[in-house]
Image: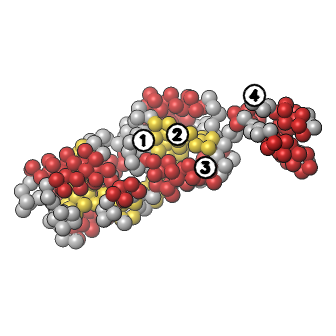
């Protein structure tokens, strides 16, 4: 049988209301009584019900984390940072995988809302179509919400981003300056915000270098096989003398697919073709330690998102709705 607050009150020799105050409003209980109640709770292995406590304190110290696709190896890196920050702040994170479905996302928002959680963190890039984010904009009007890697700051939603346009522009120009005759971009076939930003950075670099006519862009799924197929198509469409000597890829998972395709065709990286990934995914770094990649600092952004949720829960809303970090090539 589970231990109840009534059992703790009997063990400590106080009334039930005093036990409740000890857990929810400890400042109103003397140190001696507080110690007696906590000692009794420990002996009985009693833990206060978080939901019941939340009804009193209006805080369950729980944060909902919604991820579009847990198969994307980058998102667990962000979630790891979120979970670490929650633990440091005595909070709990609840993870939901939406499969990039607006319907599932709305379902999880309703379900988590019933648990009276303190706020929501939405991880990952989103559709550029605003109607797919309208429910989040409405949610943020009355609940702490933070976006990671999607920008809804213009609509009052706190957003933490990396400057993907500037990063891809900088890396693309650097590759040309290193002497590469052509630089290709392997992107996603899904019109989400971050993919569009990365393509914009690539196109800006070519225009600034006076090489807009040299653009080579292939699109596929932003995963391993998508990268493999992009590389296959480029090998089929270019001769060895005209093929780009460098490839900028919009995700580390795609970069792994490019690497495998090159291995299958006997192409040496980086001797014959330069490959640059994007994300800073820890697993890909272990698999391909020599791969250069743009680090989007997932752990750092996850920590910041949790701190922002807790601040908003405490009534401290940030002056800036948009926080932008500059990712670095490493």
- Residue that label 3 marks: 86
- The image quadrant where one finds the C terminus is bottom left
- Residue that label 2 marks: 95
**Residue at horizontal 6 percent and vertical 62 percent from the top:** 241
* Element at label 4: loop
**Residue at horizontal 70 percent and vertical 36 percent from the top:** 50
- In primary-sequence order, the first of circles 4 and 1 is 4
Q: Residues within 10 Å of mark 4 (few under 14, many from 20)?
A: few
- In primary-sequence order, the first of circles 4 and 2 is 4
- Residue that label 1 marks: 70
The figure's colour scheme reads secondary structure
Q: Nearer the viewer, mark 4 or mark 2?
A: 4
Measure how far apart labels 2 and 1 are at the Cα level: 10 Å
- In primary-sequence order, the first of circles 1 and 3 is 1
Measure how far apart labels 4 and 1 are at the Cα level: 37 Å
Measure how far apart labels 1 and 3 are at the Cα level: 19 Å
Whether residue 274 can be seen here: yes
* Element at label 2: strand
Horizontal and vertical percent position of residue 323:
50, 55
Q: Tell me where residue 174 sits by quadrant.
A: bottom left
- Residue that label 4 marks: 1
Query: In this rendering, is residue 164 above or below 156?
Result: below
Q: Residues within 10 Å of mark 1 (few under 14, many from 20)?
A: some
- In primary-sequence order, the first of circles 2 and 1 is 1
Measure how far apart labels 2 and 3 are at the Cα level: 12 Å
* Depth check, front residue: 275 or 304: 275
**Residue at horizontal 90 percent and vertical 34 percent from the top:** 10
Q: Is residue 118 left or right of residue 31?
A: left
């Amino acid at each position: 049988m589970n231990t109840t607050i009534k059992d703790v009150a009997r063990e400590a020799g106080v009334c039930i209301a005093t036990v409740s105050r000890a857990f929810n409003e400890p400042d109103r209980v003397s140190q001696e009584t507080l110690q007696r109640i906590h000692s009794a709770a420990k002996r009985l292995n009693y833990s206060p019900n978080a939901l019941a406590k939340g009804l009193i304190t209006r805080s369950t110290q729980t944060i909902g984390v919604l991820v579009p696709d847990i198969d994307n190896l980058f998102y667990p890196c962000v979630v790891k940072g979120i979970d670490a920050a929650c633990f440091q702040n005595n909070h709990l994170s609840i993870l939901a995988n939406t499969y990039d479905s607006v319907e599932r996302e709305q379902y999880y928002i309703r379900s988590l809302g019933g648990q009276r959680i303190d706020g929501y963190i939405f991880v990952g890039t989103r559709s550029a179509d605003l109607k797919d984010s309208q429910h989040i904009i409405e949610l943020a009007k009355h609940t702490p919400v933070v976006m990671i890697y999607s920008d809804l700051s213009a609509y009052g939603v706190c957003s933490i981003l990396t400057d993907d346009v500037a990063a891809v522009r900088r890396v693309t120009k650097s590759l040309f300056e290193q002497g590469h005759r052509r630089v290709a971009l392997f992107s996603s076939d899904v019109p989400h915000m971050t993919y569009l930003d990365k393509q914009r950075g690539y196109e800006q670099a070519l225009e600034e270098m006076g090489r807009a006519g040299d653009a080579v862009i292939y699109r596929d799924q932003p995963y391993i096989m998508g990268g493999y197929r992009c590389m296959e198509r480029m090998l089929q469409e270019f001769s060895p003398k005209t093929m780009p000597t460098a490839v900028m890829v919009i995700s580390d998972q795609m970069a792994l697919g490019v690497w495998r395709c090159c291995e299958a065709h006997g192409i040496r990286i980086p001797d014959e073709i330069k490959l640059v990934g994007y994300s800073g995914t820890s697993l890909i770094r272990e698999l391909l330690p020599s791969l250069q990649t743009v680090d989007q600092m997932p752990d750092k952004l996850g920590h910041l998102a949790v701190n922002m949720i807790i601040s908003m829960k405490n009534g401290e809303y940030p002056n800036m709705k948009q926080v932008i970090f500059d990712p670095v090539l490493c």
